[in-house]
Image (cartoon, grey):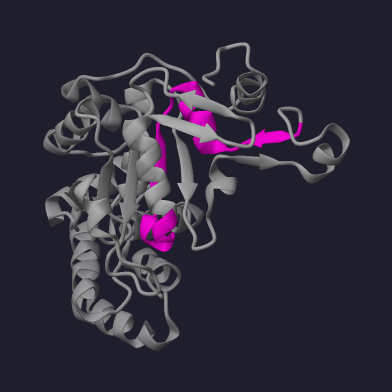
């Protein structure tokens, strides 16, 4: 049985999630989306990538963002989904114990004892909320989930509906806003592989580390500090992270470079200076680039080579 707007579960979704899901005018034009991503979200995204994602949505296919950590997959995906639907996207961070009850819904034990196993005791979860609200869903680190969970998601996306057999109800997507983007880091250890069936049904978009000029632009747009970061220092910082991507097992992404620059700028502010200097950059590196004890010497070595200190 399909449901209508007066259904108790639909009302419950609006009561629980309606107050945290913000609405805006949907954006379906690539040029406009690229501009808004830059101006409002401070994200620098190629028009080609945006166009491919929107084309996949229009073709009824979910999208897989795959690439190393810190390259903006999650943040860009969430922003695109939000702009496309005109509603705040839901984010599902995957783990190996994720199942339908954690993303679709389940019965609250105490309420079930009082009211029985019915709409009164059923608690809708984010995926069900997204399909009812016509909002997007970002499934983060899909490789960390089980194959059964992946297949369940693809079935829901393909048919654009969720069946809740315990309630004998079918909840269908109400418009084009319900779209899904998966993220994945194939090089991460301790995670599963994606099946051929999964890969056949998604549009895969590869993310990688940006060229130095683009990474400098990313840092500039996200620095948010009164202290000025000289161009020469920024070029040296990017040279450091690029070298660490070759030598270290923890490879800093652009997100790490941004954090490094932000901490260095705050140190300059605390010194009462309006300009970041080498001391700020080196000091900030000890808390932003030291990720593993066994690789601290590698970081120190690269810092000495680039900055000569």
Q: Residue furthest right?
A: 114
On whether residue 123 falls in the magenta region, the answer is yes
Q: Quadrant of the N terminus?
A: top right
Q: Would you say residue 31 sits in the magenta stretch?
A: no
Q: Position of residue 23 (x, y in %)?
A: 47, 18
* Residue 230 visible, this orientation: no
Is 196 positioned to the left or the right of 145 in the image? left
- The spot of residue 144 in percent (x, y) is 42, 62
Judge from the rendering whether residue 70 lies leftward or rightward of residue 31; answer left or right: right
Q: Is residue 155 above or below residue 88?
A: below
- Specify the quadrant of the image occupied by residue 154: top left
Query: Looking at the rendering, which quadrant does residue 236 occupy?
Result: bottom left
Using the image as rendered, state which of residue 221 and residue 82 is in the foreground.
Answer: 82
Residue drawn where x is 27% and y is 69% of the image = 187
Q: Is residue 155 above or below residue 143?
A: above
Which sits in the foreground, 51 or 98?
98
Which residue is pictured at 51% across the width and 33% down the height? Answer: 163
Q: Nearer the viewer, residue 35 or 200?
A: 200
Q: Quadrant of the C terminus?
A: bottom left
Rendering coords of residue 45 (x, y %)? 21, 38
Residue under the image location 63 percent in, 16 percent down: 7
Q: Which residues are magenta?
A: 121-148
Please name whichever residue, 190 or 108, is drawn nearer the observer in this view of the structure.
Answer: 108
Question: Image quadrant of residue 60?
Answer: top left
Number of numbered labels in the structure image: 0
């Amino acid at each position: 049985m399909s449901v209508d707007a007066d259904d108790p579960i639909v009302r419950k979704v609006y009561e629980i999630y309606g107050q945290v899901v913000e609405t805006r005018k949907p954006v379906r034009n690539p040029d406009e989306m690229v501009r808004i991503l830059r101006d409002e979200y401070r994200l620098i995204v190629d028009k080609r990538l945006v166009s491919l994602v929107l084309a996949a949505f229009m073709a009824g296919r979910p999208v897989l963002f795959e690439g190393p950590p810190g390259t903006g997959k999650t943040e860009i995906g969430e922003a695109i989904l939000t702009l496309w639907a005109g509603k705040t996207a839901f984010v599902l961070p995957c783990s190996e114990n994720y199942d339908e009850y954690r993303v679709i819904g389940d019965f609250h034990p105490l309420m079930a004892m009082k009211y029985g196993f019915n709409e009164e005791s059923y608690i809708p979860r984010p995926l069900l909320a997204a399909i009812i609200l016509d909002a997007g869903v970002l499934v983060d680190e899909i490789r960390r989930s089980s194959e059964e969970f992946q297949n369940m998601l693809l079935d829901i996306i393909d048919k654009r509906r969720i069946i809740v057999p315990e309630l004998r109800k079918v909840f269908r997507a109400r418009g084009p806003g319900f779209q899904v983007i998966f993220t994945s880091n194939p090089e991460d250890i301790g995670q599963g592989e994606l099946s051929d069936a999964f890969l056949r049904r998604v549009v895969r978009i590869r993310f990688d580390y940006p060229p130095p000029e683009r990474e400098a632009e990313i840092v500039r747009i996200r620095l948010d500090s009164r202290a000025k970061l000289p161009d020469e220092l920024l070029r040296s910082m990017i040279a450091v992270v690029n070298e660490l991507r070759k030598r270290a097992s923890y490879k800093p992404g652009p997100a790490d470079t941004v954090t490094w620059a932000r901490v260095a700028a705050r140190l300059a502010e605390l010194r009462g200076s309006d300009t970041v200097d080498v001391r700020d950059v080196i000091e900030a590196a000890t808390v932003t680039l030291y990720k593993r004890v066994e690789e601290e010497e590698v970081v120190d070595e690269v810092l000495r080579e680039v900055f000569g200190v």
